[in-house]
Image: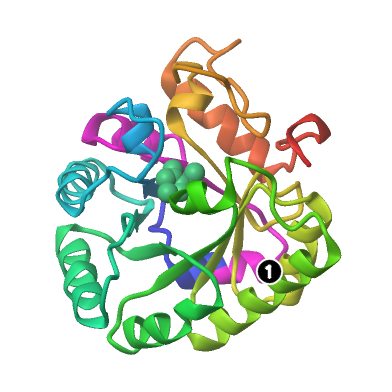
Amino acid sequence: MTSVTLSSLKARKRAGEAFSCLTAYDASFAAIADKAGIDVLLVGDSLGMVLQGHGSTLPVTMDDILYHTRCVARGKSNSLLMVDLPFMGNPSRERLLENAADLMRAGAEIIKVEGEGWMADDIRELTRRGVPVCAHLGLTPQSVHQLGGYKVQGRETDAAQRIIDDAKLLVEAGASIILLECVPASLGRAVTEALEVPVIGIGAGPDTDGQILVMHDILGISHGRMPRFSKNFLEGNASIEAAFRHYHEDVLARRFPASEHCF
Ligand code: KIV
Ligand code: NA
């Protein structure tokens, strides 16, 4: 298997081929996911919820993310390694650049930032300095209190148009990937068709170029309620590797997500 890169993901988008993404937080699971063919591994700040037991991602620090990035980087070989910039990781341009440098030195190959159009200048600066960026739009969990809960975003026409405009703006600024969380399937499709860069979805319908889920959700071991957009892939599979492979194959064949996982 050859290594996954930004250019190979872009080529797959052009060819109409889907790709799979999954969160990973340590070397052992990263190695299994990599072996199962998962294209992109994300050290997500969801670790604050699934590993640390918090009710949101807000308490996650740079040190937490760096620790888990180093662990995952040691376990993976072919998958592309994406890493979250944690809450308030960009209080100033200078701190953003320092934090991004630390994440890249720890093994990140692309950095994911949550935000809207205002992120454009930060993204331009990171990209100019050789740091590829994924811009996370739609439901941005670091803004959960501002949003008033984990709710579907972009349901109204104005809000949907704002997400399309922001995605275009951030790609113009240099974003290499857009990630859309919890938006109507029609919006997931519109953003994917409007952009040349790959679009990854979670709860964004079946038409995005990539799909991502939280590892603990697909293994059915997350505490609390399972999100509607997720699916337990361990059910009916005899091992974790088989579950990851089943997820990967279902994404590539566009069998996942089915209509019951979409908004
Ligand atoms: O932190 C995370 O796991 C994420 C994904 C759910 C997209 O940001
Ligand atoms: Na995240």
Locate the C terminus and report the quarter of the image it occupies: top right
Q: Secondary structure at mark 1?
A: helix
Hey, which quadrant is residue 68 in on the image? top left
Q: Residues within 10 Å of mark 1 (few under 14, many from 20)?
A: many
The three-letter amino acid code for the residue at tag 1 is: Ile
Residue with the mark numbered 1: 163
Please give the name of the residue rendered at 28% of the width and 42% of the height, measured from the top-left corner: 59
> How many labels were placed on the picture?
1
Residue 22 appears left or right of 111: right
Which residues, given as a range, are shown in magenta?
A: 10-38
Rendered location of residue 145, percent (x, y): 49, 47
Please give the name of the residue rendered at 30% of the width and 36% of the height, measured from the top-left corner: 31
Colour mapping: rainbow
Q: Is residue 201 above or below residue 159?
A: above
Rendered location of residue 92, percent (x, y): 26, 77
- Magenta-drawn stretch contains 54: no
Q: Is ligand 1 less than 8 Å from the beta carbon at label 1?
A: no
Residue 223 appears left or right of 160: left
